[in-house]
Image (cartoon, grey):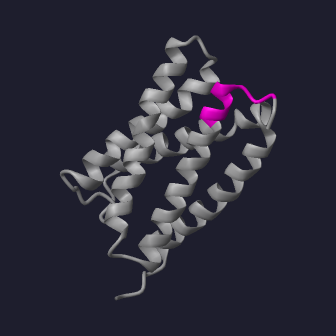
Amino acid sequence: MSGVETATLAFAVYGVGCQIVLTGFFAARRWWPRGAPWLGWVAYSYASLGLALGGTFLLGGESWRLYLGPIMLALWAGFGLVVDIWPRLEWRRPVRWRVLIPYVALYFWGQMLLWWPLWDLWRAAWFVFLAFFAVSTLLNLRGHFVEAPRE
């Protein structure tokens, strides 16, 4: 790992960490429904750390490639806390497009802006992110379109 700058390491750890937490949350929705709400809090809380990380990068003069993804994911986390956790709004069924569109856009672009820069910054982290992103996305989609088992 020699040669990896501190900012790149922090960026990669945050991004891969988000994928690990999200993978755990989406898996829990399927196989541990009682633990899923707690892991939802963990996922949103972890993602919200992007505000501090991205702000540090921004104020430290780092490239937009390092601060934009964490800040965008933190915005998704804040939005998600409001619509999913407190106060909980039912917006998935029936679909409330005014909630769904910004929720999905913030999530998608936050994820992509954490992943894409890793290609140039630290290729090994890019592949690790990809692996966890693929699993978390499959679990997430499965959770929305396949009925979860009952306890």
Q: What is the x, y in percent for residue 136? A: 57, 61
Any part of residue 112 in sight: no
Q: Which of the image's four quarters has the C terminus?
A: bottom left
Tell me the residue at 70%/37% (across/down): 116
Looking at the rendering, the stretch of residues picked out in magenta corresponds to: 3-11
Depicted 28 relative to depicted 44: above or below: below
Tell me the residue at 33%/59% (across/down): 95
Q: What is the x, y in percent for residue 72? A: 47, 33
Tell me the residue at 22%/56% (across/down): 89
Depicted 57 relative to depicted 77: above or below: above
Any part of residue 70 in sight: yes
Q: Is residue 86 magenta?
A: no
Overall secondary structure of the magenta stretch?
Answer: helix
Q: Is residue 8 magenta?
A: yes
Q: Quadrant of residue 137?
A: bottom right
Q: What is the x, y in percent for residue 32? A: 41, 77
